[in-house]
Amino acid sequence: MKPVIFGIKGESLGADERAFFADADPAGYILFKRNCVTRDQLRALTDELRALHGRDDLLIMIDQEGGRVARMQPPEWPAFPAMQTFDRLYDLAPSTAIMAARWNARALASMLRECGINVDALPLLDVRQEGASDIMGDRTLGAEPMRVAALGRAVLDGLVAGGVVGIVKHIPGHGRALVDSHHELPTVIADEATLEADLEPFISLRAAPMAMTAHIIYTAWDAERPASLSPIVIEQIIRQHIGFDGLLMSDDLDMKALRGDIPSLAAGVVAAGCDIALNCWARMEDMVGIANALPDISEASRARLDRARAEAASTKNDMPLDALMAERDALLAVMA
């Protein structure tokens, strides 16, 4: 198995993809809007991926946050609120907000599991900062670390109750970035004492099964390399200081924050300490290069992957989607 998650070109596997994926044996796949057209089509795609690898617990992930980040969209699937909705409710009724976030995540999980998806890139534990890039904005759970941690835990619990594993992101924190890492490399110049507030939600949820790195330079820790490529940040901050021992994946290698060819970047993030490289755009040349550049997955990374997959398989939702959304909406009505 190669320590990489690949994207897929379209609504079904092409013959070239089918042959390549069978040979490369990636750790999993990530889906985007281009892959999500109807329930039946999407379920057929995920079923084909599982059959290709002979694994019912194959990692198949999506970035389905709600709000502006939604790959599965109306009218085929219901719209979900942005995460900031639960932050606003927390201002009025903290315990109600926590319950609403949990029901919302259970509903998300129900929608994903119906289509064969078992991992969601949620929740964001990035602590929102005044004046920072709006790339986080309404995707975040708040500007106060304890609130972010409380709502983040509710999201993780709701997802797993529906049979889906959540990914905490963007470790060790994207909240202070002044530019969007999709387009350029952010540099955070805060000192270590200031950065402690950003780490608090990740420390609180350090037992999460999966996390995604930030493509950001933190000058207090490593002034030369973004976190995804920094052995210092990954080992000393993420593994030791935060205490995270789950599956650590990079953010997408195609983001403009990173410089270099994609296969070299994949090798770089794995060499720096990421368990998995994330490559989203399904360009065959890049994927072949990545498969050639990467070693087989390490024993430690495989064990973390197996633990995460086992968590997704351990529970199955027993309520219909409409009922789950109704429970959430009754709680959100406090803000009406």
Image (cartoon, grey):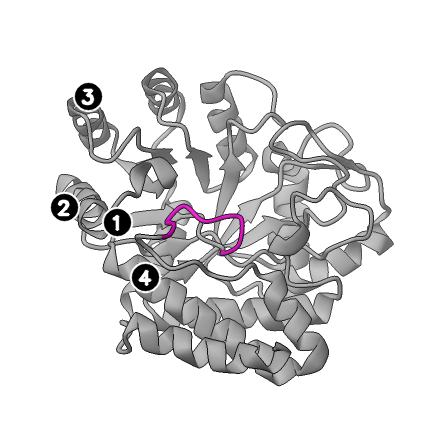
> Residue 247 placed where, x, y %?
46, 51
Horizontal side of residue 295 vs 270, given as left or right = left
- Is residue 246 highlighted in magenta? no
- The answer to whether the residue labelled 3 contacts the one labelled 4, judged by CB atoms less than 8 Å apart, is no
Label 3 sits on what residue type? Asp
Task: Return the residue at label 2.
Answer: 54
Q: Which residue is mark 4?
A: 111
Distance CA(mark 3)–CA(mark 1): 20 Å
Q: Residue at x 14, y 46 (%)?
A: 54
Where's residue 275, x and y in %? Answer: 46, 42
Q: Is there CB contact under 8 Å for labels 3 and 1?
A: no
Q: Main secondary structure of the magenta part?
A: loop
Occupied quadrant, residue 178? top right
State the image coordinates of residue 304 (x, y, percent, origin top left).
Answer: 40, 53
Q: Amino acid at mark 1?
A: Leu
CB under 8 Å between discs 1 and 4? no
Tag 4: residue type? Met
| Whether residue 217 can be seen here | yes
Magenta residues? Answer: 66-74
Relative to 325, 47 lies left or right: left
Between 42 and 227, the one nearer to me in the picture: 42
- The reply to whether callout 3 and callout 2 are in contact (CB within 8 Å) is no
Mark 3 → mark 2, Cα distance in angstroms? 19 Å
* Secondary structure at numbered mark 2: loop
Residue at position x 40%, y 70% from top?
Answer: 106
Q: Which class describes the residues within 10 Å of circle 4: few (<14), some (14-19), or many (20+)?
A: some
* Residue corresponding to mark 3: 16
Residue 204 shows in this picture: no
